[in-house]
Amino acid sequence: MEGLKNEYFMGWLKSFELSNPDVREGWKDRAFAEENAGFDVIVFRVPKERASDFIFSIEKMLQDRTK
């Protein structure tokens, strides 16, 4: 599953991190680079208390569909 995480998931972003211009610009640059590489960038907003469950479910779905 680690390969899928590296291929499909950029990671977590917390709102307080956006106050750091380097973090903000880094995420914008990463999204731009992924779009230029032919990928769509999708953002999910999930409840904090369910985030791990949702991420696991999405990872599992991608794993099942990419086999």
Image: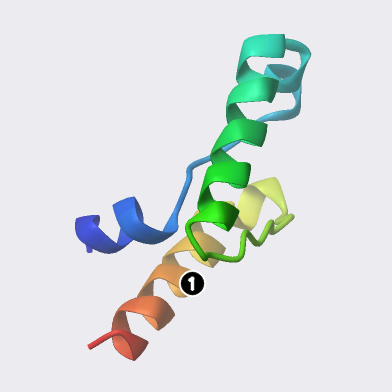
Q: Residue at x 44, y 54 (%)?
A: 9
Rendering coords of residue 37 (x, y %): 48, 57
Foreground pick, 2 / 30:
30
Task: Name the spot of residue 10 as percent of width and height, x first.
Answer: 48, 46
Query: Counting other residues with Cα less than 10 Å from the Cα at mark 1, is it few (<14), some (14-19), or many (20 or more)?
Result: few
- The residue at the point 22 percent across, 58 percent down is 3
Q: Quadrant of residue 16?
A: top right
In the image, 41 versus 58, the foreground residue is 41
Q: How is the image coloured?
A: rainbow
Q: Secondary structure at mark 1?
A: helix
Measured along the vertical axis of the image, is residue 39 above or below residue 13?
Answer: below
Exactly how many numbered labels are in the figure? 1
Is residue 19 shown left or right of residue 22? Answer: right
Give the residue type at disc 1.
Ile
x and y, in percent, of residue 49 in the image: 64, 50
Quarter assignment of residue 17: top right
Q: Which residue is mark 1?
A: 58
> Which quadrant is home to the N terminus?
bottom left
Image quadrant in which the C terminus is located: bottom left
Q: Is residue 58 left or right of residue 40?
A: left
Residue sticking out furthest to the front: 36
Which residue lies at the image location 31% right of the left edge and 51% below the top edge? 6
Q: Nearer the viewer, residue 28 or 2?
A: 28
Residue at the image point whose x is 41% and y is 60% from the top: 8
Residue 53 image position (x, y, % from top left): 50, 63
